[in-house]
Amino acid sequence: MSIDRGPTTHFGKLVTGRRYVPVFRCGTTAVWKILLLALILPAAGWSEELPQQATAKYLSMQDAVAAVVENNPSLAEMQARYEALAEIPSQLGTLPDPVLSLNALNLPTDSFSVGQEAMTQMQIGIGQVMPFPGKLALKEGASEYEAQAAGHSVDEMRLQLVRNAKSSWWQLYFLDRALDVVASNQDLLRQFIQVAKTKYEVGDGLQQDVLLAQLELSKLFDQEIKLQAFRRNQAIRLNVLMDTPPDDVLVLPEKVGTNMPDVLDENKLYQQAEIVRPLLKQKENDINAAQSRLELARKEFYPDFKLGVAYGNRSGDNPLPRGGSRADFLSVMFSVNMPIYQKRKLDKAVSQRSLELRKTRNSFRDKWAVVRSEISSATTDYIQARELFVLFKSGIVPQAKQTVSSMLAAYQVSEVDFLNLVDSQVTLLNYEVQYWKALTEANQALARLVAAVGKEDIYE
């Protein structure tokens, strides 16, 4: 919402706030009338387009959330990372590629003839490394847990983005309503000024009452300017979350539901969060991955194997008395690596993985404490804001409005001081702003509570 109180021209009049002041008289010459008419007509045509601007589509909170989930680049980045990690486990769980070898063995350097020497052969072979049983499964399992953790991190980021989108939307809604309150209080102060002027002109009032009311009106203009700046900055934040141009104009609906249901008991919310909160599920998968890496480090004490077979073709004939062509060779190979560097390498690897597992478990405990703290804090803030909202709605604001009306009537008959009238108006302004602030804070607390639990079903 945008409120512009600066002077503008409208159909040949100077607009100051909501009052029209003529800028030319009927006694102007015909030439001047024609010139002025030429200036006024474009303005009139422009003013007719204003209702079309009011048809801009309202941005509901649900639309804002949907846009953030669909378009936010950070979430898309996390999703791509998860999908990339999901392609790794099968790679790690597959045997290493076999090795094909083509060899020329024992060639004589004097002639390089393949038939000159009996041991010369042209060989073709294939070899395969066979990790110790269980190693590949542990590597694949650790990678799968890491991919699942990345998937839960995507869900966690989605929760946080939804929370931020709701919070920004409600902050925008509060600023819109605060601007409305300021505008209505500006109208009220203009009424005060008119009453004070009338009383002063007939000798029943003081000039200082008029000046005081004008000063309070100027303060409201100052407050309006600041609220407009705050709103623009908040709109920029929401536009960035939705991946839209930062200067896009966001128009919010004026009316929203004010129903504030009861939420579940904190212990029940803890139980739900322990089951469904993506952050905790991510940490659980991190623990499983760390456990698999520790078991893999212990498996490294066992050797890997390498199997191979080769066929060697020989040329030439055997010498007499045996004679005949030379037989080909068939070779079978079996080898193992020797993990002998136990203290400097293998023991250190096990110690490293053990410490990483301990770190991950402590991280889970820390995040679990944070989640419970978030739930308790959001629940407390929601209950407090809801009670304040009900109090302002049913008691304080209506009473403050009645007080202002009563004080204005009493001032008109000189039964109360003008300063008390202005004080009652300022009090009404503050209470009305606090009314909308309580509604906003209650809904922002609900958004935090949903994000802390990890699901929407948090109500009794």
Image: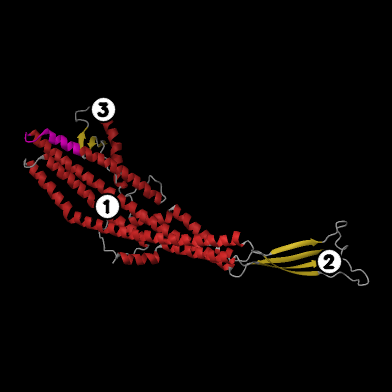
Q: Amino acid at mark 3?
A: Val
Q: Position of residue 3 (x, y in %)?
A: 27, 43
Residue 260 picture quarter: bottom left
**Residue range highlighted in magenta:** 202-216
Q: Position of residue 160 (x, y in %)?
A: 39, 56
Dot 2 falls on a residue whose secondary structure is loop
Dot 3 falls on a residue whose secondary structure is helix
* Residue neighbourhood size for the residue with mark 2, other residues' Cα within 10 Å, grouped as few (<14), some (14–19), many (≥20): many
Point out the residue furthest to the front here.
Answer: 343
**Is 305 part of what is drawn in magenta?**
no
Can residue 277 be seen in the rendering of this structure? yes
Q: Which mark is residue 254?
A: 1
* Residue neighbourhood size for the residue with mark 3, other residues' Cα within 10 Å, grouped as few (<14), some (14–19), many (≥20): few
Residue at 31% of width from left, 40% of height from top?
46
Among the two numbered marks 1 and 3 on one chain, the one whose residue lies closer to the N terminus: 3
Q: Which mark is residue 314?
A: 2
Residue 210 picture quarter: top left
Q: Which mark is residue 31?
A: 3
- State which quarter of the image contains the C terminus: bottom left
Among the two numbered marks 2 and 3 on one chain, the one whose residue lies closer to the N terminus: 3
Q: Position of residue 350 (x, y in %)?
A: 55, 62
* Of the pair 300 and 206, the residue shown nearer to us: 300
Q: Amino acid at mark 1?
A: Glu
